Amino acid sequence: MMHPRFKYRGDIDGLRAVAVLLVVLFHLDLTAFSGGYIGVDVFFVISGYLISAIIERSWQGERFSFRNFYARRVKRLFPPIFATVLATFVAALIILTPLDLQNFAKSAAAAVVSVSNFVFFFEAGYWDADSSLKPLLHTWSLGVEEQFYLIWPALLVGLLTIQKRISLLWSFALVTIVGAAVCLWMSFINPSAAFYLFPFRIFQFSIGALTLVLARGQRLSSLLSHKGVRELLMFLGIAAIIWSAMAYTEETLFPGFAVFPPTIGACLALMAGGAMLESDSKFSLSGLLANPLSTWLGRVSYSMYLVHWPIIVLYRYATGLELTLWEQGGLSLAILAATLILYYGVEKAFYSRGENKASTEDVPSQKGFLWRTAALALGLIAFGGLAWQQDGFYKEKDEVANIVSQTENQSASIEGASYKKITFLSPQQIRSGKKDRFQLYENACRLTTYFTQEECHRDRPIQVLVFGNSHEIDGYNFMQAGYGNNENINFIVFGSMNECVKSELVDDDWTTTNKECEARKKILENPKFAEKLDIIVYASRYPYYQRKTRTLHIFTQLRELNPKITVVTYGPFIVVDSECHKVINQTKDVRNCAAPDYIRHFGFNGRTTALKEDFKKMESHYIDRISMLCTDPDDAMSCLMQTPDGIPALYDHGHISYEFGIMSGEMYAKTHPNLFEDIMEKGPN
């Protein structure tokens, strides 16, 4: 049984300090801490450990009350969250464009009721193109924690009630093992679900509880009584956490197997710190973790976590720049100042530490506070709903469009044309523009139904597979516009390699855990399909990128089945650092989507051409969109960036709008009217 007094653990606050600093440094783009996001996992383990200890101690003293517990959680968590959401909302009204304000409003309402993790899961993954535009993205982890608080007390009290028949040790071990297995399974099936949703994170909370029980076992307690053992466990724990933060990147499959080092590291640190003796030197690892600065950072870690991300996101949104060293320093000071305001002005005003004191509070006297909290929550939700319903308070008068000469538009690719100069896009225009990219693609001949789908004209003499990642859609629109009416050609779409979650080369073959992608893989490997295939149109943002070895292998396999297969590469265009619609609405000029201050890539660079020679061996034709759409191949500002009707070339970072793709395809077909017939006549490279 636990000792009736649960003493203050400075090492736990020190561990919180490590966790929050890793997250902040990661979000400040310090490359040395490219995996600093694992600080959140450390917080999960700490929560499982502490909440289980608090509930167990109260239950043993016959003082546990669900009402008291949840009243304490509300006072602890919600005032700082509400203050952060409200302050961020005020700043967002000034800084964000209507569409992004509308999306922010949805996440703000979700954060207030602790379900923002579901909102961000349904929108996309943590590393999606819009993540830098989401000021409340970090609240996903608070949603997970608060969902843990909803179910864990009842589960733990139930286990405590029957612990004479079912031990806590084996119960927590079962939850941890099953939860970890489910997390691993989902990481390969749907990484976003494994990342955002509580059922796939429960094992991190339960392993914290398991650590609590294990540490008081007789054998382990005896081992932990030796200072050398404590020091070793603390060293291994902190080392595992720091190593993960420095070794992982945004491309690491996470959670996956990568979740275990920081999770286990947090357990080891908690176990070693729990056995620390008063006689231990302050220069021991546990003592260093419990130093005054670390413990203070640990105490303010919740406020720091809440304020840091909105400050970084809104600053970057307003400036559109990569962070310099001076900016990182300035933002650090701003984060510290906001932390002090939130912690001393809000968090401490509503919550004081000390579970003994809390457990004897007269909760009915707190009814006024709870009612005020509910009213404020409803007010924030209502305001968020209003902003969402009114398209981020978009006003029609904000949109300006006029006709400008082609020379003024710096678009000499089509001579003698006049263009609408679009200086603002409404939320509805942006949403429709992004959705319209798929209108042709949705009705395309699909690889999975190639042998059965009526739209698949398998009798046509030229069979073309359009293959790529998310840019496969752009390649298909381009080809359909230029050659879709040619009755000699049948276009087949692969379905995007992006759907092939965790596909990789293993033993000279590529594997995937996605069942739908596995079905497409089998069709590619079917000799009956390969022998009919003539041409692959390869459409990717960076077709020769160093990580395209899997694609190269697929093309090689197809050519082994049919040596006559040849490749047409749909070359790159412009990649914008921020989404193009944001640049247009902020700068009032569509041309700025190609301005040096806003573009990430124009054409190729060293990393994106690593496999160029290998692909060129199979490539019979290269579609040079830059030469077609730009008057100067070295100057992105010379490129055509909209259609004559004023539709921008891009709405997001790099995917081509439907109208611009159709225009481009028609332009190319005028200069290459018999492209596929000429390729067939020439034969494979």
Image (tube, helix red, strand yellow):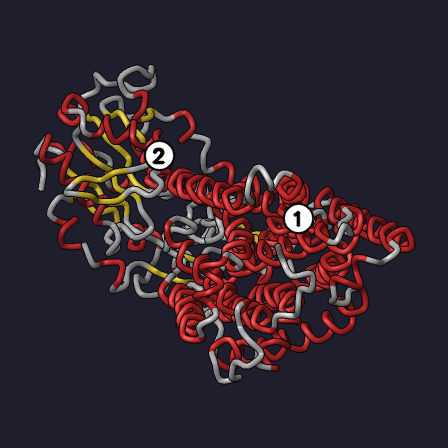
Nearer to me, 158 or 143: 158
Residue 306, visible in the rendered structure: yes
Tell me if 33 is positioned left or right of 6 in this view: left
**Residue 537 drawn at (x, y percent):** 25, 38
**Residue 420 drawn at (x, y percent):** 54, 50
Among the two numbered marks 1 and 2 on one chain, the one whose residue lies closer to the N terminus: 1
**Residue 218: mark in rendering:** none
Residue at 20% in and 43% down:
506
- Against 178, is 326 above or below? below
Q: Residues within 10 Å of mark 1 (few under 14, many from 20)?
A: some
Q: Residues within 10 Å of mark 2 (few under 14, many from 20)?
A: some
Residue highlighted by disc 2 = 514
**Residue 149: mark in rendering:** 1
Tell me if 53 is positioned left or right of 580 in this view: right
**Residue 681 drawn at (x, y percent):** 10, 33
Quadrant of residue 167 within the rendered picture: top right
Q: Quadrant of the C terminus?
A: top left
Query: What is the secondary structure assignment of the residue under circle 2?
Result: loop
Residue type at numbered disc 2: Asn
